[in-house]
Image: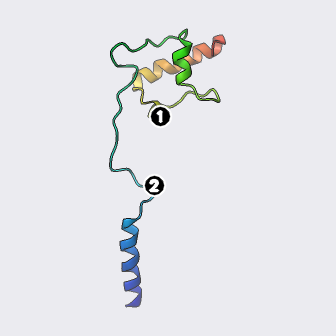
Amino acid sequence: MKRDKKRKGKKSNYKNRLSLFQRPDIRFNRSCPLSVKDAPSIDYKNIKLLRKYISDTGKILPSRITSVCQNKQRKLSSAIKKAKILGLV
């Protein structure tokens, strides 16, 4: 019986704690910055735009960080790769 009391106490404390792997209850939906009106066009020659989506180490940032939609992310990654090959970035 003593064990049951200890377990009950731990369960109530366990529910109150936040877990590192727990999904957040609130999610923020951000709109795609490249799909809004008057957004810059994605082009391999537009280096100022491409630099925003490249990390310090030269890797392409994922869409979950930049909040770019899937279609634009594909175009963006191909433009970045083309600019890297040409030596613009």
55 sits to left or right of 1: right
Toward the viewer: 35 or 73? 35
Residue beneath disc 2: 21
The residue depicted at 44 percent of the width and 59 percent of the height is 19
Quarter of the image containing the C terminus? top right
Quarter of the image containing the N terminus? bottom left
Q: Quadrant of residue 29?
A: top left
- Asked which secondary structure carries label 2, the reply is loop
- Residue 21: x and y, percent? 45, 54
Which amino acid lies under the numbered mark 2 shown in the image of this protein? Phe
Q: Quadrant of residue 69?
A: top left
Is 34 above or below relative to 62? above
Tell me, yes or no, if residue 48 can be seen here.
Answer: yes
- Asked which secondary structure carries label 1, the reply is helix
Which amino acid lies under the numbered mark 1 shown in the image of this protein? Ile
Q: Earlier in the sequence, mark 2 or mark 1?
A: 2
Residue beneath disc 1: 65
